Amino acid sequence: MQEVKFVFESSEKSNVSGKCTWESPSNIALVKYWGKKEHQIPANPSISFTLSNCKTTTTLHYTKLETPSKDFQFDIFLEGEQKDDFKPKIATFLKRIAQYVPYIKDYSYKIETSNSFPHSSGIASSASGMSALALCIMSIEKELNPSLSEQEFIQKASFLSRLGSGSACRSLEGDLVCWGTHKEITGTSDLFGVKYPFEVHENFKNYQDTILLVDKGEKQVSSTVGHNLMHDHPYANNRFNQAHDNLSKLIGVFKTGDLSQFIEIVESEALTLHAMMMTSLPYFVLMKPNTLEIINEIWAFRQETGLHLCFTLDAGANVHLLYPEHEKESILAFINSKLVGYCQNGHYICDTVGFGAKQL
Ligand code: DP6
């Protein structure tokens, strides 16, 4: 499939000004996207659970200009406060998508955005934020081209989201989304995310994700820098092959509901991601002492109770605890008695796998 499919071609012009609002969630990868080629093409396929509580709500006000602008006219507000420091990232996004949505130069914009999670929580907002904005832009396109089907709408919104932030293309639908071509998974593409198309066992319904906030500081390594570390990385090819293999194994796991194998794959993916960062040049250690304490506590708890609590990590020190809904009570008791002590100011966020973005 080629990018050209996503170029908006209608000569329709609308004089309409208006606004639209979308709410889009964050997601947590089970097989990690780490490494990319030009134009936001992933070096390997990935899969994630879509979340429900961690989300961004964005309202896009658009006003028709007399003559199309040369560059992009917009102001951005986070929780009501003007955020000029967000502008370069949004401008880069708009520049990347302009060839696919040429009508964006016909308007000026006010972007109002807010996150359900605290701003300085160390939780990345790029997936939810970029997907919410891409969906708002697609709402303008839908006005210009009402014949756009729901499927075309979502696929192009995912395509545009990817150009804002790779992982954002996995946030539009639920509850499991794949991105990146994988030979065994029908319909997968490097250009956009697709709903996982095969059977998923009851064990994974309403899967829980409790995010332990170990370090609420700014990201130590930006994702762009991080992904670039995979160029000329000594283990890159093996890592990319491993991601394909892990995704193949997960197909069986989702079918049978084998939680032990699920845990093995998910924890190995998280540790591999960090291993890649520790073995790149320059090298980084993104875990904090409390990240390791938590990992050891989880392993001891699992040994003792036989419950299916496991962890995953993004490119930072916070820990995502993943567990099945029917074990929630005992695991929450353990979090509150033991793990909360390792969180900054005792903060953690409870989330559940969800079903994707919503127009408000
Ligand atoms: C570790 O999607 O933030 O969370 O495409 O540069 O915006 P950019 O990167 P980004 O990378 C996320 C990496 C990850 C793993 C994952 O979500 O798959």
Image (cartoon, helix red, strand yellow):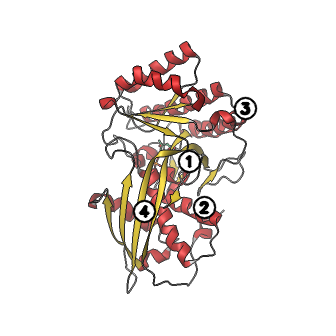
156 relative to 123 in the view: left or right: right
Q: Amino acid at mark 3?
A: Thr
Identify the residue under disc 3.
256
Q: Is residue 39 visible?
A: no
Query: Residue at point 45% right, 19% down?
Result: 297
Whole-number angstrom distance, CA of label 3 to CA of label 4:
40 Å
Whole-number angstrom distance, CA of label 4 to CA of label 2:
17 Å
Q: Residues within 10 Å of mark 2 (few under 14, many from 20)?
A: some
Q: Position of residue 280 (x, y in %)?
A: 43, 36
Quadrant where the image shows the N terminus:
bottom right
Identify the residue under disc 4.
93
Q: Amino acid at mark 2?
A: Gln
Whether 279 is drawn above or below 32: the answer is above
Q: Residues within 10 Å of mark 1 (few under 14, many from 20)?
A: many
Element marked by disc 3: helix
Identify the residue under disc 1.
43
